[in-house]
């Protein structure tokens, strides 16, 4: 569906102005959409998941540990695929206004792709360098949207999401470096062309949604504050978009239709997309790629 056709459908959660801003800018913040009872459930689920992480001494398929993690003082970067680890996460991904917000920007038939919970731990939670997402998980069209939920208030010191306005309408940058290694970052010389006034820092109160188009250049800074920044991210697409490379965060719910009906025909956008490494051989998360130095030669590897 083109943005014009999507906008003709009745809005469910977002205002028409917010939907238009999403298509114009490549992102939009909808403040205080998720009510406190949902947030309380998620905080409990987060606490339970952090509790389980105490037993770990290294990252595994579910948890990505932050430097300094220990049983006494857990420090987490990410819980991958939270929907597979605690029922609260799938309930919110499928039954809450988050899935309705997805319908507001992809059309009435909505498919779930994957989810992650980025903790950005207090006092040093790591940055995300500037990147675009769709090259990591190409689809037959560019409908995919990531919907982030700020579970707590997020201010500028906590490393909120930052976006380059209108960048979803620009080119797709290669997420490989000159030696052919996957680094998941926009080359510095390209970012040098972006003027500071084109960057929005998306601070918002707890319960706010950040809708991020799959082509938008985005990143976030280190968390310099004494407060964590738990950010629950669910990715959806129109039902007629089909991923044609491995899912980096596979889930038993991948492909589930959360609103409307499944598609009988795939919709193909004519613009090609870069192909990522083969995630079925393993996925290590953006930090590992982004920190890789060009002397670390594993051509074409992940
Ligand atoms: O958590 C963040 O600040 C950024 C998330 C992100 O860009 C990603 O997970 O790809």
Image (cartoon, rainbow, N blue to C red):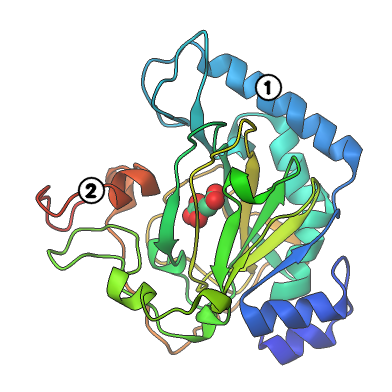
Q: Residues within 10 Å of mark 1 (few under 14, many from 20)?
A: few
Residue at 34% x, 77% y: name it: 190
The percent coordinates of residue 27 (x first, y second) are 65, 71
Disc 2 crowd rating (10 Å Cα; few below 14, some 14-19, many 20+) is: few
Task: Give the residue displayed 49% in from the left and 9% down from the top.
Answer: 71
Residue 15, picture quadrant: bottom right
Tag 2, which secondary structure? loop
Which mark identifies residue 292? 2
Q: Is residue 11 left or right of residue 136?
A: right
Residue 58 pos. (x, y %): 36, 21
Depth check, front residue: 160 or 283 = 160
State the image coordinates of residue 136 (x, y, percent, origin top left).
39, 61
In this view, 129 is above or below 167: above
Residue at the farthest top position: 72
Residue 86 placement: quadrant: top right
Q: Nearer the viewer, mark 2 or mark 1?
A: 2
Which element carries disc 1, helix, strand or loop?
A: helix
Q: Quadrant of residue 300?
A: bottom left
Ligand 1 under 8 Å from disc 2 Cβ:
no
Which image quarter is the N terminus in? bottom right
Residue 294 located left or right of residue 27: left
Residue 261 visible in this rendered orientation of the protein: no
Residue depicted at 69% across the width and 86% down the height:
3
Residue 202 lies, in percent from the top left, at: 66, 60
Q: Earlier in the sequence, mark 2 or mark 1?
A: 1
Q: Is mark 1 within 8 Å of ligand 1?
A: no
Q: Is residue 127 above or below residue 136?
A: above
Residue beneath disc 1: 47
């Amino acid at each position: 569906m083109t943005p014009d056709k999507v906008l003709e459908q009745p809005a469910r959660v977002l205002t028409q102005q917010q939907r238009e801003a999403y298509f114009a800018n490549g992102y939009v913040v909808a403040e205080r959409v998720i009510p406190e009872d949902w947030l309380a459930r998620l905080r409990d689920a987060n606490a339970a998941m952090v509790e389980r992480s105490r037993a770990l001494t290294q990252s595994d398929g579910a948890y990505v540990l932050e430097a300094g993690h220990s049983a006494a003082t857990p420090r987490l970067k990410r819980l991958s695929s939270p929907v597979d680890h605690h029922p609260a996460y799938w309930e919110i991904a499928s039954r809450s206004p988050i899935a309705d917000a997805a319908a507001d920007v992809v059309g009435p038939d909505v498919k779930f792709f994957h989810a992650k919970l980025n903790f950005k731990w207090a006092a040093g939670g790591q940055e995300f360098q500037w990147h675009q997402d769709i090259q990591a998980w190409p689809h037959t069209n560019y409908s995919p949207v990531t919907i982030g939920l700020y579970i707590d208030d997020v201010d500028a010191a906590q490393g909120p999401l930052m976006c380059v306005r209108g960048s979803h309408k620009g080119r797709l940058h290669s997420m490989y470096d000159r030696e052919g290694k996957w680094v998941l970052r926009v080359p510095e010389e390209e970012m040098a062309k972006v003027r500071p006034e084109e960057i929005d820092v998306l601070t918002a109160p707890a319960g706010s949604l950040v809708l991020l188009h799959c082509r938008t250049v985005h990143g976030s800074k280190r968390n310099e504050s004494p407060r964590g920044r738990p950010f629950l991210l669910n990715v959806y697409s129109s039902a007629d978009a089909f991923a044609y490379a491995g899912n980096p965060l596979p889930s038993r719910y991948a492909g589930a239709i959360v609103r409307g009906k499944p598609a009988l025909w795939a919709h193909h956008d004519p613009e090609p997309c870069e192909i990522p490494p083969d995630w079925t051989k393993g996925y290590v998360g953006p930090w590992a790629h982004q920190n890789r130095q060009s002397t670390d030669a594993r051509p074409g590897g992940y």
